[in-house]
Image (cartoon, rainbow, N blue to C red):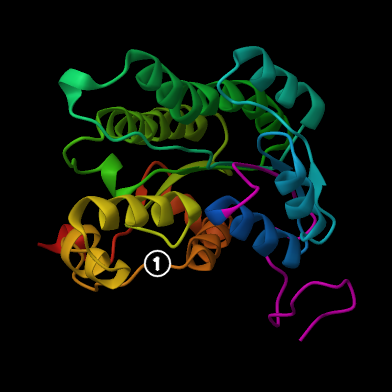
Amino acid sequence: MSGSNGHVGTGSPSPVEGRRALVTGAASGIGLAVARHLGARGAHVVLSDLPGERLDAAAGSVLGGVAVAADLSVRADVHRLADEVGDVDILVNNAGLQHVSPVEDFDEQKWALLLEVMLTSPFVLIRRLLPAMYRRRWGRVINIASVHGLVASPYKAAYIAAKHGIVGLTKTVALEAAARCPDVTVHAVAPSYVRSPLVEGQIADQARVHHMQRDEVLAKVLLTQNAVRRLIEPEQIAESVEFLCGAGAWSMTGSVLSLDAGWLAH
């Protein structure tokens, strides 16, 4: 049921209502789900991704959504994004990509690209946008990490290094923010495999390599570590982001919210 302001009514105001949010990697998958969820809860959402029709369509699907294109592999573009967006209350660092290769064959340019997009650009955006959160005495930095920010798997050296790095960055900035303003919190979300274009591409690749059907790939390859062998829905990540924007999440600052389907319970 919708309230008079057009967002979904929940009986009490959402912690994101009236807040300004920036979501990177927002043209599809987790980023788009987060942007739509925050917009539906009354936030003013800026969606950023590579320029093109996908980003424009994504922004058009978000209540009050605005698109600001940027290539996060280009440092100048990251700074331009920060300049164009200005002050935000909520920063969701989500943009990501994958490359699979044995480490001895891992292309150095691919390594640099993944680290630039998934670790350096979040650092730059945090560095640029955090001071305004301090001035306003409220802010949320939420980094979309991965279960691979906590454990490793073969052939994903750059992705795993970047995700371990974003977990470390989360903890460091949380400690600094806590000393400055307790209402500026920093969290990481670490999901297992999510139903997203990135994962669907991995499923297709694995199906070709192993000569399997899609369901076989999920059961016998991708989800073997999960206690619950099911893909996580992007909307479930979005709900976690809203939760971390709530008042009670101060007690979790610096922590990693693990949405791993039981992976780490083994």
Mark 1: few, some, or many residues within 10 Å (few <14, many ≥20)?
some
Residue 9 part of the magenta-drawn span = yes
Hey, which residue is sitting farthest left in the picture?
266
The span picked out in magenta is 1-28
Residue 203 is left or right of residue 33, and the answer is: left
Residue 95 part of the magenta-drawn span = no
- State whether residue 15 appears in this view: no
Residue 92 is left or right of residue 54, and the answer is: left
Looking at the picture, tell me which residue is in the foreground, 256 or 192: 192
- Label 1: which residue? 232
- Residue 200 found in image quarter: bottom left
- Residue 125 found in image quarter: top right
**Rendered location of residue 71, percent (x, y):** 64, 26
Circle 1 sits in a helix, a strand or a loop, which is it?
Answer: loop
What residue type is disc 1 on?
Answer: Ile
In this view, 78 is above or below 204: above
For the N terminus, which image quadrant? bottom right
In this view, 258 is above or below 66: below
**Rendered location of residue 212, percent (x, y):** 22, 64
Q: So how many labels did they put on this image?
A: 1
Q: What residue appears at the point 78 percent right and 32 percent down from the top-left corner?
A: 85
Looking at the picture, tell me which residue is in the foreground, 40 or 105: 105
Q: What residue appears at the point 27 percent right and 44 percent down from the top-left corner?
A: 148
Looking at the picture, tell me which residue is in the foreground, 157 or 145: 157
- State whether residue 77 appears in this view: yes
Q: What residue appears at the point 21 percent right and 65 percent down from the top-left corner?
A: 226
**Rendered location of residue 176, percent (x, y):** 46, 27
**Rendered location of residue 14, percent (x, y):** 69, 67
Hey, which residue is sitting farthest bottom in the picture?
1
For the C terminus, which image quadrant? bottom left
Residue 104 is left or right of residue 72, and the answer is: left
